[in-house]
Image (cartoon, rainbow, N blue to C red):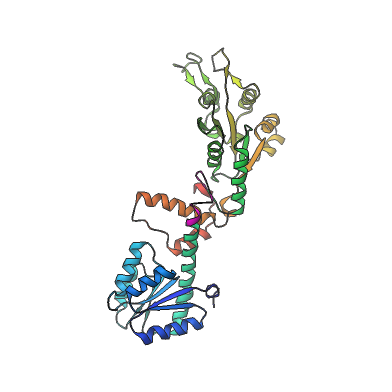
Amino acid sequence: MAGYASVTTKVLIVDDEENQRTGLASMISSWGFAAETAADGVEALEKIAESAPHVIITDLMMPRLDGFELLRRLGTQGSMPPAIVLTAFGNIETAVATMHDLGAYWFLEKPIQPNALRVLLERAASHGRLAEEAERLQRQLSYQGVLGNLVGQSAVMQQVFSLVRQVAPSKAAVLITGESGTGKELVARGIHEHSPRRNGPFVAINCAAMPETLMESELFGHEKGAFTDATARRTGQFELANTGTLFLDEIGDLSLVTQAKLLRVLQEREFTRIGGVQPIKVDVRIVTATNKNLDDLVRKGQFREDLYYRLGVMDVHLPPLRDRGEDVVLMALCFLKRAAGESPRIRGYTPAALRAIRAYGWPGNVRE
């Protein structure tokens, strides 16, 4: 028997024929499942509300509330566990249509073959356990595993959250490292939002996306007439971030020339616009991020060692998504919750989708 029965998978048998449901319950219990029974759809809904079974085995033709309506109501409520539909000989087409329209997963023709039922139960049990785990993770979203827009329940992410909360109140520069797409800007925003500067601006700039010829103007601004295309004064990102946080993403792509100018601003806490003569005092906290190994760049002479030490007073490392265990499911649920707000028809993931989410390697990390 697969391991799911050993953790007491709950199975609800819904059939108006007493001998059929009691016989099934006895057989299923002997396999290690916890079996409950209901005589029709009305009683089944009551049992489902009380005990939340992992799997439902249901007949279609029953009094009061038949199997069709039972599955339809469960699907509408968004609480549809994996279902095995029992059907009499000759009604296979009806059963298949039910699976397609109402979300039931399998059908089994009467008279029931025990081996076939057991195989389906093991499959359905694995689906039901995945769905239960997804619901547990969803509940955790409301009270833990979240820091701003960061989501994570794994031990490594809890360490990140703890470190963010520690470094946020200080004025020290923070260097965030990690692979591309791991959410470094979200960490930077989390640091800002938990800092005394939270009411000030958060300004982000991607150093890799900005041509070197424009970087100085982007950071420090320029005066009108400073160069050919300078038709008006431009306020730089340092000035815009005053009293707040300036986030410099992909800091490892900054040229040595710009690195020297950045270092001076960090030391003097002032800068001059291109073409200007008046120094401008600035009160900015610097948070940087990179997917490169700055130690290697320093050894190769591609990154200033003195700037490296200035920027890396505090270091936060973000692990790749493949090393974060169940965080990928928690994150998928969070994104689904956001999508459901835009489309009420979206109710959840199928167990097969959750398995696929778990199995995939996510080389693009959170961004993917």
Residue 317 x/y as whole percent: 63, 44
Whether the magenta-drawn stretch holds residue 149 is answered as: yes
Query: From the viewer's perspective, is residue 149 above or below residue 328?
Result: above
Say if residue 97 shows up in the picture: no
Q: Is residue 227 above or below residue 8?
A: above
Q: Which residue occupies the foreground of this view, 347 or 308?
A: 347
Residue 336 percent across, percent down from the top left: 42, 53
Quadrant in the picture for residue 247: top right
Which residue is pictured at 46% across the width and 51% down the height? 334
Report whether residue 99 is seen: yes
Nearest the camera: 260 or 242? 242
Report the residue that reaches farthest toward the right: 299
Query: Is residue 357 rendered magenta in the image?
Result: no
User: Where 262 falls versus 252 (above or below)?
Assistant: above
The span picked out in magenta is: 139-150
**Looking at the figure, which quarter contains the N terminus?**
bottom right
Q: Could you say which quadrant of the image residue 176 lies in?
A: top right
Query: Measuring 37% from the left and 62% from the top, which residue is drawn there?
Result: 78
Residue occupying the far left of the picture: 64
- Image x and y of residue 214, in percent: 52, 25
**Would residue 251 be found to the left or right of residue 19 on screen?**
right
Residue at 47 percent of width and 17 percent of height:
233
Q: Position of residue 298 (x, y in %)?
A: 70, 34
Indicate left or right for 137 with 269 as reference.
left
